[in-house]
Image (tube, helix red, strand yellow):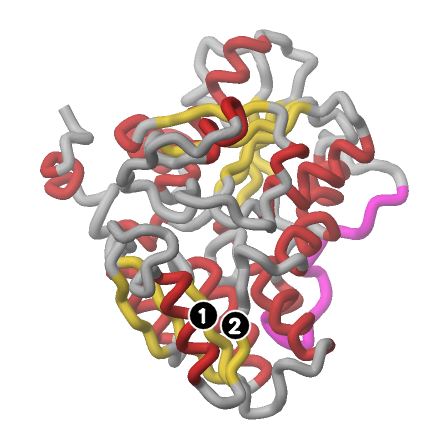
Amino acid sequence: MTAVAGSPPRPHTTPYPDVLGAAGNTPLIRINRVTEGIRTPVYGKAEFMNPGGSVKDRIGAAIIEAAEARGELRPGGIVVEGTSGNTGVGLAIAAAIKGYRCIFTIPDKMSVEKVRLLEAFGAEVIITPSEVEPDDPENYVMRAKQIAHDTPNAVLANQFYNAANPEAHYRTTGPELWEQTDGRITHFVAGAGTGGTISGAGRYLKERDPGIRVIGGDPVGSILRSLAETGTPGEGAPYKVEGIGQDKLPSTLDMSVVDEWRSVDDASAFRLARRLTREEGLFVGGSSGLLAHAALEVAREVDDPAACIVFILCDTGERYLSKLYNDDWMRENGFLD
């Protein structure tokens, strides 16, 4: 694909005042080998190439700057958040530049790499149990709310209910996808942890072309597909994929933007993530494998060389060396034959 007329110059050609300017403008990459036998072109949006290694770099600075603009975050302040890891990194990078402290709560199912990475940025990390109800005081989101309430000069980033989250993707991710595909994108596949990416980018794309299909990739065990299709959340269940799926509906997820949901099990997500690394050279995490699986399903069904399917490559595989890239862990969990 060629650049559209009047598009901005290639990114990173001039210096930035700090690392925050390097977030966004990630490349769009054709998927070639794992799509063998599929006529429909499939592309991955390489969000793992952001400075902090994930799509969440786009919202870290946006959330902090919105809190500053509201007067809630002042010099010497503390940023508190419940995170699966990646949003914490995005916030920690912005906090490092702006001089704030960070306290993060993170569920115990998340990889040790994520915990150590947050600590490397100087954040205080509190591990919480994964298998508790959404409203349990020990749930990572509820625990973060309590810490923010009890800590002087602290502000809750509140990624699940913060309008700055989807707005960041409406302003950046959506326009980038439109320009990078010359407006030929026909299907957009994304996950929903907070729902910011799929809601913000999806809304922008549909404003440009209402015919674009927005598809949510959902882990088996998440409630989002059931909620969209039946109006009831159904029975949630534990799953191993990190960062996407939900046990409750966040306000940052606009369900009206999503045309359909596709469920993918852990084994399929992890195996395809490993294939993306070994066959495409794209070192990504399990959520990327899940979205790639959903995108390939759509591509087979569409079966049209004129279509253009794009999915999000959410984060770097370096965060999962102890998990999906560890054969022993994969076998212990029944994900390898």
Which label is found at residue 145?
A: 1
- Name the residue carrying label 2: 156
1 with respect to 18 (left or right): right
The correct choice, above or below, for 278 with respect to 151 in the image is: above
Per the rendered image, the range of residues in magenta is 6-19
Mark 2 vs 1: CB contact within 8 A: yes
Look at the numbered disc 2 and give the secondary structure of its residue: strand
Quarter of the picture containing the N terminus is top right
Badge nearest the viewer, 2 or 1: 1
Indicate the amino acid at tag 1: Lys
Percent position (x, y) of residue 10? 73, 51
53 with respect to 335 (left or right): right
Q: Residue at x 68, y 37 (%)?
A: 202
* Number of numbered markers: 2
Percent position (x, y) of residue 208? 82, 33
Percent position (x, y) of residue 316? 41, 50
**Camera-side residue of 309 and 245:** 245
Q: Any magenta on residue 11? A: yes
